[in-house]
Image (spheres, rainbow, N blue to C red):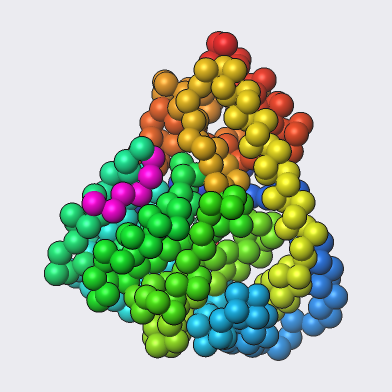
Amino acid sequence: MKIKENINSIPPYVPGVKIEGKEKLSSNENPLGSSPKAIAAIKAIDSYSIYPEGSSRILREALAKKHQISPENIIVGNGSDEILTWPSLCLIGKGDNAITALNTFSEYTFSTLITDGEIRKAPLIEGKFNKDEMIKLIDSRTRIIYICNPNNPTGTFLPKDEILDLISAIPDNILVVVDEAYGEYGDENFYSCIQEIHNFSNLLVLKTFSKIYGLASLRLGYAISNSELIQNLWKTKQPFNVNQAAQTGGLAAISDEDFVNKSIEMNNKGKEFLYNQLDKLGLKYYKTQANFICIDVERDSKEVYNSILDQGMTIRPCTSFGLNNYIRITIGTEVQMKNFIKYLKVALDL
Ligand SMILES: Cc1ncc(COP(=O)(O)O)c(C=O)c1O
């Protein structure tokens, strides 16, 4: 068998490590668990014998109401990971390229390579996506630009004027994917680009139920864009890609404001605690708009990861993101954050 060269070249996905008996703060999951409304709605399902509704119609209608757009502007996927492969399938072939940043979520690379495209990576400047660096990489074969806002793993973001400036600078024959997986954790300075789909025909915004609703293992995400692109993405999706439990749970989660508010509140408290402690320790970190924080440990992050693991917690060394001296930790409960600081001090000999 001859495996295609573009498939051979795909680097394996590096997931956050999960180890029995260790606290897991390595994958930006919700430390408060799942939306109770979602869990109750899933428990109430009494049969799985019929195929799910292939278009996730009811869920799309509810999402449309929430975001004040039309259901025709929405497509739902088995996690936003699944959705990320569709624009490539529609737009990228051999000789084409996509652009993203050097230190960002790896699925943009994966989705480009899988359809035999070339991935180009612009450096972050001061930890942020940078318009000039990205624009420089555009040529006549550029088909997609991926922007992670807020960015995983740095937690940095482009505020309204900067994200709009960047999108405006991209020719409208190039699709701009703005991945807002962590947008709900942002403060008043964070700007969601959802409404901008009416202003930019080449914009697609990506959202997930994995983080703020605590439904990572249910696998549910969605994309928002102009209806013509959505219809084309539709052609590449499996007919029954989103299972019944995910559609039902997601629908219930949307109205679970209590859980969302608690999650944001816990995140804000954890963030302030960490800022305070890290400042006291004299460590550098990026201010975050997400549910994780990226810390400069000024040494091989794997050593720090191993020490924290031995003490009882999995975090993320940022080596696979190209940031060898940084660690990323999900912001957790008060107890988890206190433990983390205790473990970090031991790891860094502070
Ligand atoms: C930036 C970003 N986008 C998308 C995803 C994938 O989300 P989902 O669980 O919906 O596939 C993640 C997961 O960690 C992420 O960090």
The residues colored magenta run 127-132
Report if residue 128 is visible in the image.
yes
Residue lying at the far front of the rendered structure: 161
Q: Is residue 55 magenta?
A: no
Q: Quadrant of the N terminus?
A: bottom left
Seen in the picture, residue 133 relative to 54 is either above or below; the reply is above
Residue 206 x/y as whole percent: 49, 67
* Number of marks: 0
Residue drawn 71% across the image and 38% down it: 269
Secondary structure mainly formed by the magenta segment: loop
Left or right: where 335 falls relative to 310: right
Instruction: Give the quarter of the image for residue 243.
Output: bottom right
User: In the displayed structure, would residue 261 be above or below residue 63?
Assistant: above
Compare residues 276 and 254 and report the one nearer the observer. Answer: 276
Question: For the C terminus, which image quadrant?
Answer: top right
Residue that sits furthest to the top in the current view? 349
Image coords of residue 107 (percent x, y):
41, 57
> Which residue corresponds to the image point at 81% horizontal and 66% vertical from the top-left?
37
Q: Residue at x 26, y 64 (%)?
A: 169
Is 272 drawn above or below residue 102 in the view shown?
above
Q: Residue at x 22, y 57 (%)?
A: 135
Q: Is residue 245 above or below residue 24?
A: below
Is residue 334 left or right of 151 when viewed as pictured? right
Question: Residue 86 occupies which quadrant of the picture?
Answer: bottom left
